[in-house]
Amino acid sequence: MARNIINMILWHPDMQITKTEITYIHRGAPENLKTINGNSIVRLDRGFLILKEGTQIPIHRIVKITNNNEILWKK
C-alpha cells in the first residue's frame, strides 16, 4: 500500500513531491524512526525507495506518508 501511495505522489499532476514526508524505521535513530522529504527520492524500485545519496529504504519499513501535512497513509 505504501508503494502505491508514493507512486501516486510521484506521478499525479496535483501532488507535489516536495511537500511529501516519509517516515520509516531506521535503527539507531531517535525512537528508531527517521523522516525524509520527498525531494530526496530518485525513484521507486520494486521493493525499495531509492534516495539521491544512494540510500535504499525497504518499502516494508515505511510507517507514515504525509503530503502537505495531511496523513495519506499510516501503518
Image (spheres, rainbow, N blue to C red):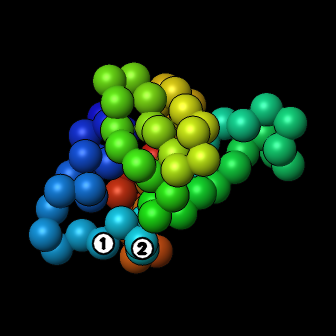
Which x, y percent locates residue 60? 49, 26
Label 2 sits on a secondary structure element that is helix
Q: Which of the numbered marks, if any, corresponds to residue 8? A: none
Q: Is the residue marked by circle 1 packed among few (<14), some (14-19), or many (20+) residues within 10 Å?
A: some
Query: SS for tag 1?
Result: loop
* Residue sitting farthest toward the left: 13
Question: Residue 16, labelled with which disc?
Answer: 1
Percent position (x, y) of residue 21? Answer: 50, 62
**Residue where numbered disc 2 is placed:** 19
At x 25% / y 46%, what residue is drawn? 7
Residue furthest toward the front? 53
Left or right: residue 42 compared with residue 26? left
Q: Residue at 79% of width from left, 32% of height from top?
A: 27
* Occupied quadrant, residue 3: top left
Residue 66 seen in render: yes
Q: Does the CB distance between marks 1 and 2 fall below 8 Å?
A: yes
Amino acid type shown at disc 2: Lys
Say which quadrant the N terminus sits in: top left
What amino acid is labelled 1 in the image? Gln
15 horizontally vs 21: left or right = left
Height in image: 43 above or below 10? above
Q: Nearer the viewer, residue 33 or 50?
A: 50
- Residue 31 lies, with reference to residue 20, above or below; the image says above
Asked where in the image residue 31 lies, by quadrant, the reply is: top right
Residue 69 position within the rendered picture, expressed as x and y whole percent measured from the top left: 46, 74
Identify whether 66 is placed above or below 27: below
Give the distance between the C-alpha atoms of the residues marked 1 and 2, in whole angstroms.
6 Å
Q: Above or below — where is 13 with respect to 6?
A: below
The residue drawn where x is 16% and y is 73% is 14
Q: Taking 1 as reference, is 71 left or right?
A: right
Q: Is residue 21 visible?
A: no
